[in-house]
Image (cartoon, rainbow, N blue to C red):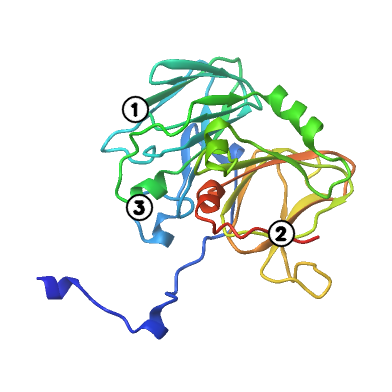
Amino acid sequence: MEKEYITVYEYEKNVNPCLIHVPFYEKNINECDYGINIIDFSNIFNVIHKSTTPNLLASFIKIQENDNIELNNNENIIEFNGTSHLFYIIKGTCSIYIDNDEQNLYVGDILITPCFNTIKIKNTGNEELQIYYVNDSPLVNYLGNKANKKIFKTAIYKNEFLIQKLNELSNPINNRKGILLSNKDTEAIGVNTITPVLWALYNEIPPKTIQKPHKHNSVALDLCIKCTDTENIYTLIGDELDDHGNILNPRKVHWKEGSMFITPPGLWHSHNNIGDTHAYILPIQDAGLLLYQRILGIILKK
């Protein structure tokens, strides 16, 4: 039996196995059904648990007026078996009960919470509720573990706070205008991210901004949170740069409010706004984990 199970490979031919790359993908919440809409590429990663990327799971949640949804983290439902959970309110207002502890959120707010038993989300407004939800359950499930230790505190980043800090801290003449979200627990580790695993950037793209390309080893789950000019605001993504530092043969992703798109790891990308309006994007990555492992490898072209 043991001989049937084990195997070996010659080093030089197999040290870099041919893995399917993290796919490019785009999804708008307005294309989703009511309930939780999980973006799943587990077939690409050859795992039985749902995965948007090897480490992260992204979902859109839509709840009708006067309705609610419940997320149960138990042995039979492993999609919520994460150490880190992030909720961004795209539209509407809600109460989120985390193991019966109530949190009230409004459009533009971000809530983070560690592992939980049950989360109930109730639409408390008079319109449809839309939420973007990211957790690290694929990482935990890949390791065959159960998240049961809270490694940071539940917290809310209010929309007003985010806008205030963006205006206070961002240099208006910088090519990139954004703030990294953090807290005392991640500051103590030294990664300065929104959770020990998740990284989040509240990012403004002002008018007439041509961003220099950058790349990193983490996967970005980019959510466009505000954009009124889909023609002139876009992201360029590609494998290589030319001699002038521009992306060669890039894929062009036009921003659409309420859309998320995946930026695969290791690709050059830049966010650009050639129009006259401001736009905002919320990239969420597994960069907290990669920073801690000292392998994020972010490169910013100057």
Q: Along the line of sight, which residue is nearer the eye, 210 or 230?
A: 210
Assign a secondary structure to mark 1.
loop
Which residue in the protein does label 1 denote?
117
**x, y percent for residue 169:** 78, 35
Instruction: Give the foreground label among 1 and 2.
Output: 2
**x, y percent for residue 269:** 70, 59
Whether 137 is drawn above or below 266: the answer is: above
Whether 280 is drawn above or below 42: the answer is: above
Q: Residue at x 56, y 50 (%)?
A: 287
Q: Which mark is residue 142?
A: 3
Drawn side of residue 256 relative to residue 182, left or right: right
Density class for disc 3 (Cα within 10 Å; few <14, some 14-19, many ≥20) is some
Which residue in the protein does label 2 denote?
214
In which quarter of the view is residue 257 placed? top right
- Going from the N terminus, do you reach mark 3 or mark 2 first? 3
Assign a secondary structure to mark 2.
strand
**x, y percent for residue 102:** 47, 15
Q: Residue at x 49, y 26 (%)?
A: 154
Q: Along the line of sight, which residue is nearer the eye, 276 or 301?
A: 301
Distance between the alpha carbons at the discs numbered 3 and 1? 20 Å
- Going from the N terminus, do you reach mark 1 or mark 2 first? 1
